[in-house]
Each structure stands twice: as structure tokens, then as C-alpha cells.
Amino acid sequence: MTTRYRIALIPGDGIGAEVLPPACAVLDAVGKRHGLTFTYDSFDWSCERYAAEGAMMPADGLDRIRHHDAVLLGAVGWPGVPDHVSLWGLLIPIRRQFRQYVNLRPIKVLEGVPSPLAKATSDVDFVVVRENVEGEYSEIGGRLGRGFPDEMAIQQSVFTRPGVERILDYAFTTAQRRSGDVVSATKSNGIIHTMPFWDELVKEAGDRFPDVTWRQEHIDALVAKVVLDPSRFDVIVGSNLFGDILSDLAAAVAGSIGIAPAANLNPERDHPSMFEPVHGSAPDIAGQGVANPLGAIWSASMMLDHLGHPEAGAEVLDSFASVLATTDVRTRDLGGTAGTKDFTNLVLEGIAGR
């Protein structure tokens, strides 16, 4: 019996168009082993489209992908288009309209990818659970007196009880499947309203999940501890801003932000979830065929997990981990000379040989 999925592809900008084909090739290869068939619809939503037409995506863009089973994104951003334009014109509307309130970032030190930290060995294996649709990244605020000496800007943070509770429930449930430990990122000693509110809801979540141990850490101390002893963490949960910063820091601790994956999840599956590598569009190497496809391939593995095929997702993860552990093939960002196709072909060989 074959299970069919329809995937929306948004290559975006720069190396995004170079890393999505490897991810699709890996999906097709592992799909054959597990009775999965993928159909891909590609959309040219990008900074190039913005420059030509004045919008990152068409007005009915969300309706075009609303009924897909998942979204695979390459990268967004290009010189000449401000980052807030590309972000608020594409990524944030998708995340918010499709209620992708969980941003999930797995952090692993893979064998063969040395961390810049001497003590960060293969026992580093944790996840950052980031609230993805409210918090500090709200649309509430504005500018007043532009161009005058007393010009001002106001940005309002928004923390709702339902929004915080659902991300905490996801984090604590994730911890139940792992080693049962949650660390909450806070700053309630300096931020007087939203962070004490967050802390209160974390305590309530702890009461709902008595089998999970938890503690809170102020964000400034927490980032230091992630650097000093990353192996001590299992699940870290944070607000939109804190989770954003923590996940990139943690990816660097694991060896390279260039290999890091991310999932923007609607856990209820009322809307499609979106999967993306973290590395960005990398204009300096775009078009050279040297981009590392690992972040996109790992994101595809997370997509398989979300679609209900963890065995297939694990095969993808094991295949690229084996390439790193047993060969010296590395793309330029990891100190090697291999191209995008070279690394991808080895991963595909690993899947075929299972």
C-alpha cells in the first residue's frame, strides 16, 4: 500500500534552490523503502519576486499551499531587500496563518563534525522548543516623529495564556519522550510583566506533568551554561526571542549552523507544517554548487517524523550521520572540498544500501 503526500516547495533565495533538490531526492529514495510517494509543487516566492512584483508571494499565496501535507523551504533573504521585508512578507505569514506555534530545533554533536568546544562530544543531544507566533515578535507598535530629534519606536510583546500554555505543554510532552527534563528560559529579574507571567505558567505546567523535572534559568546565565556544559540539557523551552537566539547559539556549539534543521509545527495538524534549514541564503556561495545540503536533508527527516513515519526519518538521519562518521567527505563549510551533489550522492547510497 502506498501513502501519497503533496509537498509545497519554496526554494526562495540563494542556496535555497540548491539544497531542496537533495532533500527531495532523499525523500524519494527513502519513500520507496517505506511505501511513500511524494508529489512536489514549487513556488517562486522570493526576494527576486519581490524586486520584480513588489511582494514576496501573491495575495492568495497561503490559499495555494493551505491543503498541502507539508511545506519545505530552502532559504529567504537577499542583498537589497531588507530582512524585515522578506521575513514579514513570507515566513511569518505562513507561520501565523497556519498556527505553526512550535519551532523545534534538534541539537546534536554528530560524529565527524567537531564542535568548537572541546567538551561538546556526542553526548550533546537536546532540543530547543521555541514559541513561534507571539511573544516579542508581535505586530503591535509603531514609530512616531520620524526624522525628528525626539523620534521614538515602540514594540509591544504579547504573551497570552493559551499561547504560552500550548508551547509549554509541547515542551513537557517532548521531555516525557526523552529523559524527562525541561529548562525554561526566562528573564523575570529584569522584565517585570511578561516573564513573571511566563514563570507562573511554567510552574503550572510542572504541576500538570509531575513526571518531568524542570527548572528555570535566566537567559543570560543560560547561554553561558549551554556553552560551558551543553550535555546537561535535554529540552529547553523559550519565548520567541529567547528561543531564536538560543537555537542558533546551540547549533554553533554543535559544530555548524550550516547543518542545523528546523521545524515550524502545527501539532494539531489543522494546517501544514513547514520545514527549513537554518543556514540562510548564503549569497557569497550561491550558484557554485558547494552548499551543504545537510540542513535541508535533516529538515526532510523531521518532516517524515511529523507525517507519522519515524522509521523513515531515522533512516535519513542515520544515513547522513554515517557519511560524516565513516568518510572524509565534507562540504566547504565543514572544512572539506566536496560539492552539494557529492555529499548528497553518498547519503543516497547509504539509503539504498540499507
Image (cartoon, helix red, strand yellow):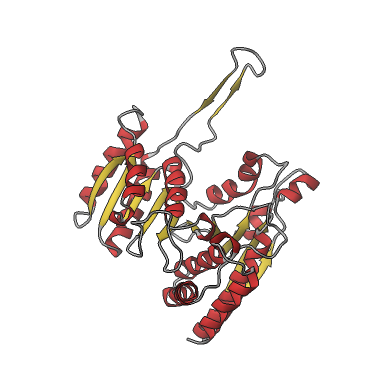
Give the camera-side residue of 158 and 220: 220
Can you tell which quarter of the image residue 192 is in?
Answer: top left
Residue occupying the point 58% across, 51% down: 94
Question: Can you say whether 37 is above or below 134 in the image?
Answer: below
As drawn, the residue found furthest toward the top would be 149
As drawn, the residue found furthest toward the right would be 52
Instruction: Provide residue 344's location: percent of width, then percent of height.
Output: 59, 73
Instruction: Provide residue 337's location: percent of width, then percent of height.
Output: 62, 67
Residue occupying the point 54% across, 85% down: 352
Question: Can you say whether 89 is above or below 262 in the image?
Answer: above
**Count of numbered tags:** 0
Residue occupying the point 42% across, 73% down: 310
Can you tell which quarter of the image residue 196 is in?
Answer: top left
Give the camera-side residue of 336 and 285: 336
Instruction: Provide residue 346's location: percent of width, then percent of height.
Output: 56, 78
Q: Is residue 244 left or right of residue 205?
A: right
Question: Can you say whether 111 is above or below 174 in the image?
Answer: below
Q: Is residue 125 left or right of residue 65?
A: left
Give the camera-side residue of 338 and 238: 338
Q: Is residue 4 visible?
A: no
Instruction: Provide residue 45's location: percent of width, then percent of height.
Output: 70, 54
Q: Is residue 217 visible?
A: yes
